[in-house]
Image (cartoon, rainbow, N blue to C red):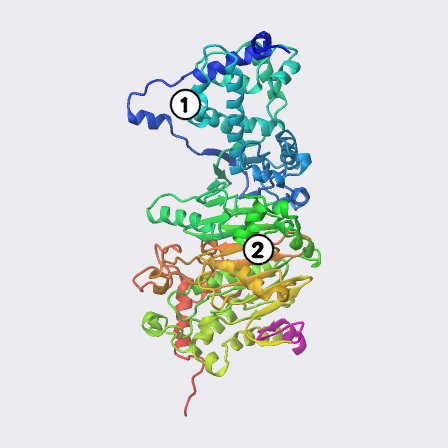
Amino acid sequence: MPNQAESLQKQNEDPILVANAEFAADLLTFDNQDEPTSLVEIYENNSNPVDVVEMATGRPAASVLYMSELLIGHQDAAVDFYVDTVERVAGLPKDMQPDVAVLSGLVQGDFKYLEKSRRSTLVPELNSMDKQFKYARQMIELVQEKGIPVVYNMSNDDRRIAEEYTIEVFRKMHDYAKSQEGVSWAKADKMRQHPAWNTHLQFQIQQVFPYCLSMGRRLLTAGEMSEATKGKVNIEEYFVLFGAHQTAQEGGNPPKAHRDWIKQAEAGRNKDVIITDDVDMHIETEGRTYTDSVRHYMGFSPSPMYQSHMKTSVDAVAQLAAGGRATPDMFITQHNQEEVGVSAQNSWIISTGGLIRARNFLEASGSRTDARGDVSRRLVTTRRRIPEPSASMHERTDDGRHIVTFFNETLNEKSFSLPERMTIAELCDLQTGSITARPDILIKYLDFIRTRALGERATALFFGGDMMHGRNYPHFPSESQMTGLMAMDSQEAFNTALFQDAFSGVSTEELKALEKVLVQPGNHEWNSGTLKWHGYSFTTYMRNLFEKMYARAGFTDAEIANRVKSHEATITARGEYASGYTGIEYFGDMGVLIQHYLMERGGKGSSGDLPVYQTHHFANGGADLMKNVDIFMAGHWHHPQYGMFGDKLGLVGGSMAGLSDYELKRGYRPTIAGTLLHIGGGLPAQVEFISEETLHDHTITTGNFTPEILKSEGYKDDKNFDAAKHGIFLPDSFAKSALQKKVLQMMRNASQRADKISILK
């Protein structure tokens, strides 16, 4: 056997070992830090701004597809869903296809040094980074092959992989350096304390991980490099890349053999994918610009699956707005494996869904489920919500709409049970009688429904409650005196007149397309005295209004009864009869439920969550009763929201009412918006949020509120009227629009019972 001296001599004669030892020694002892002149300079030199991506769509809209957390290597990765979604997106009509796809979290890692317990979650054939990078590149190129540009935003797992690679590099450098005389091992025995640690970690994050992902492989070892270059390059590929980077910073050139290798490698990279470490996307359409802030996670830690993970993002945007600072148009997190969104502070704060089938955890063996830090385990046990694989697409239009397209296996399948595309238009929280109400905007929303829904496809109107303000608060008369609508009869009379004029001239074809009118009450109806004591819900007048429309068009009593209804009781498969206002309609195989709010004692949601999370608790509480209900629609909260919980889609509609004293003193900020749900036709479910801005700019073309009719009746806009600044209930000294003037006259008529006067002769 050779002795230690002979072994060392043999190592020193190995050209690969010698070359790498020299390079490692240089890196471990090299100090490229010039002495800074001031503290300010230190901080200026260490600024680390977020990446920025500029894109232009060349059309009056921008659409972004988000697909997050596939975690290739994990046993629960829904690769089949990812592939099916890409194919489904590619098969959409051209006007529904995305301008760009933002991917994140494609690989999970091999846990070579960190979080070793998670190795048990790996698919054996995918337990190396070489394989994971190979298939990650394939998944990126699958999207690119459909003509969709890709931005890849690095995940927390990607950063952990970079840290593991840094450990790997330091181990190799130490091993190589030990064979060189004059380099003390003790100088670098604690890797993370080494002065060069952060330099190499940042290089791994900013250069090496993107390189490996775009190459579809890990870095080559010294031996593999020697073989690939026929002995021209005998050092680790990492040393080649880092050396070239370091030399470029100093204004020099690396050796020719290294340049040749880098050029050869670059030719094999996927150069079209943009890889970022968190990113601000600046998006330009024909008429607008958007800033979307994409952050992989916003939790205290990237590991625990917090239940109320949206709170940090919502509060951060709110605080920026309160401080007068710029807020992004969308603030996106990608780590939470949950599809949720809320409109607030003129921004949309969203969390993207994930691509893990966490329910597999419930069927796995103990050795598999015992892995600490496993994403499926945390979702099931910490969050206690089991998501299904999902993806979403967000389109913003130049006229102010936000359209969210949902990709979910169950909803996708049920979409084919409804042969033609249809729309459910939600109307909730009209608050007629209150100074918070915006009947002028409501009229424009009704025209929007007539022209954009009834004019194009089968439609249902779902009234979600609070059509009237009622007598919900003791101080209602003093708060809302300027409306004149103190009496319940007056509020009914005004709503009746408004809807009659808005639907004036409705055609038989429009009414045929209006397949359902479902009228459900809200707390403002049932708190107004009679429901609690006598069982009256203040919904009859609204049903009667539409029943008369159908009757005038020649529909039979049976047809009208099938189309116009209020659900006042629920029957279960077990023969149970529950009296209450839960409306459920089925369209093909898709069940849609509407209720003013879902949880009687739900507070502002649950556990600090957004109100849309009531969907999860309501569905869980109903359990088997909810198996055929797919979409849950609610109102009450005056904030547009959505959430995917398992296979259930929850929606909270915006309101047709603005800020009240009640909300102001509780720190709530309502959002005026309409909500259109598009389902069926074999296409994915979509929710179209119609913003206040959209409705301000909308020109009425149907009914008795068109500009031509208003002019003929003597109404005209005041000089300097600004729809965004001049609400209908501002004092008369403020400018008013022609529409507002007519609506105020209608209120006066309703308050005076102008159509209900008897005459004694």
Residue 101 seen: no
Q: Is residue 192 visible?
A: yes
Please give the name of the residue rendered at 42% of the width and 67% of the height, measured from the top-left corner: 743
Where the C terminus falls, by quadrant?
bottom left
Q: Nearer the viewer, residue 625 or 636?
A: 625
Instruction: Please name which of the two marks, 2 or 1, marks the residue nearer to the observer.
Output: 1
Residue 3, horizontal then vertical, whole percent = 59, 10
- Label drawn at residue 310: none
**Helix, strand or loop at mark 2:** strand
Residue at the bottom extreme, as displayed: 761
The image position of residue 738, as x and y in percent, is 41, 62
> Where on the picture, by quarter, is residue 726?
bottom left
Q: Report the number of discs.
A: 2
> Residue drawn 53% across and 74% down?
542
10 Å crowding of disc 1: few (<14), some (14-19), many (20+): some
Name the kind of residue labelled 1 in the image.
Pro
Can you say whether 8 is above or below 85 in the image?
above
Task: Give me the residue at 39% from left, 78% from top.
Answer: 752
190 inside magenta stretch: no
What residue is shown at x 34% (from left), y 59% (from top)?
735
Q: Position of residue 585 (x, y in %)?
A: 63, 67
The tag on residue 645 is 2
Q: Amino acid at mark 2?
A: Phe
Point out the stretch of residues depicted in magenta.
Answer: 555-575
In the rendered image, residue 560 lying in the magenta stretch gets the answer yes
Residue 685: x, y in percent?
Answer: 62, 54
2 or 1: tag closer to the N-terminus:
1
Residue at which label 1 appears: 195
87 relative position to 311: left or right: right
